[in-house]
Image (tube, grey):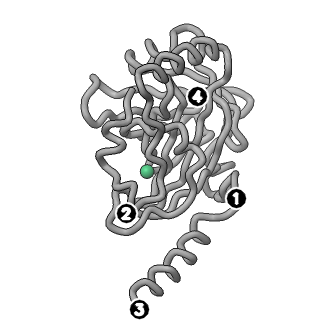
């Protein structure tokens, strides 16, 4: 779990995405102490809608001081029959969970980002979150504004550079057939700003027109 890959992909002089705190050895020690003390504390999860070259939803789970991240092209579904491809991507800094805005053209992941859902996640206690991640099967509960109840992330095949996982809703009182509720279409707006991603786009295209005229 490290942010090296995350930082290598980005130029923080240009993008407004957070660089993430650089921990010194002493800070790291106290962070791991704090992490142990906070073992019982619920961890944060966030889903960001990202209008990059291809629209997708970034699903992130707080784990050992970073956000484990998956890019989900179709977004989550409340229907247990829907298995949504979730491509494991580089760890993101915790601060990224609040990031909403526009990644400039030409930069990695260029396009608009909104915080589509936010809340707490709890790994199911059969395995530690670490063991579950290594095994490639994480069962957990979400308590977000839009997503709730039991979910699974399951890796398809052995660990590799680009890992394909599946994000699946488990059967419980929060499950709904896709034909009844398409959660990404029904609730498109940001849980932070109430803005839709299209509203950021309009603002952004105005700004870039101005820039071009200069
Ligand atoms: Mn993304």
Q: Which residue is mark 1?
A: 193
Choose mark 3 or mark 4, whichever is in front: 3
Choose mark 1 or mark 4, whichever is in front: 1
Q: Is residue 114 depicted above or below 81 in this figure?
A: below
Question: For residue 108, which quarter of the picture?
Answer: bottom left
Instruction: Tell me: 116 left or right of 18.
Output: right
Percent of width and height locating residue 179: 63, 49
Q: CA distance from mark 2 to mark 1?
A: 23 Å
For mark 2, give the secondary structure.
loop
Question: Does label 1 point to a residue whose CB lies under 8 Å from ligand 1?
Answer: no
Q: Which residue is mark 2?
A: 53
Question: Does label 2 point to a residue whose CB lies under 8 Å from ligand 1?
Answer: no
Identified at 41% across, 66% down, the residue is 104
Q: CA distance from mark 3 to mark 1?
A: 30 Å
Q: CA distance from mark 2 to mark 3?
A: 24 Å
For mark 1, give the secondary structure.
loop
The label shown at residue 213 is 3
The label shown at residue 151 is 4
Q: Is residue 207 depicted above or below 177 in this figure?
A: below
Percent of width and height locating residue 57: 50, 49
């Amino acid at each position: 779990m490290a942010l090296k890959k995350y930082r290598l992909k980005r130029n923080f002089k240009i993008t407004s995405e957070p660089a993430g705190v650089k921990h010194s050895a002493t800070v790291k020690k106290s962070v791991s102490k704090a992490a142990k003390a906070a073992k019982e504390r619920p961890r944060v999860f966030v889903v960001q809608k990202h209008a990059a070259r291809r629209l997708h939803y970034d699903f992130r789970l707080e784990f050992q001081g970073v956000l484990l991240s998956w890019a989900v092209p179709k977004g989550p579904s409340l229907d247990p029959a829907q298995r949504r491809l979730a491509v494991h991507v580089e760890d993101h800094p915790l601060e990224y969970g609040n990031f909403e805005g526009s990644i400039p053209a030409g930069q990695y992941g260029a396009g608009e980002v909104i915080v589509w859902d936010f809340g707490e996640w709890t790994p199911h206690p059969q395995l530690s979150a670490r063991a579950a991640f290594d095994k490639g099967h994480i069962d957990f509960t979400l308590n977000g504004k839009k997503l709730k109840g039991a979910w699974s992330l399951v890796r398809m095949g052995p660990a590799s550079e680009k890992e394909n996982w599946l994000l699946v809703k488990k059967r419980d009182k929060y499950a709904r057939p896709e034909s009844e509720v398409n959660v990404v279409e029904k609730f498109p707006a940001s849980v932070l700003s109430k803005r839709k991603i299209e509203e950021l786009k309009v603002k952004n295209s105005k700004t870039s027109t101005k820039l071009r005229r200069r």
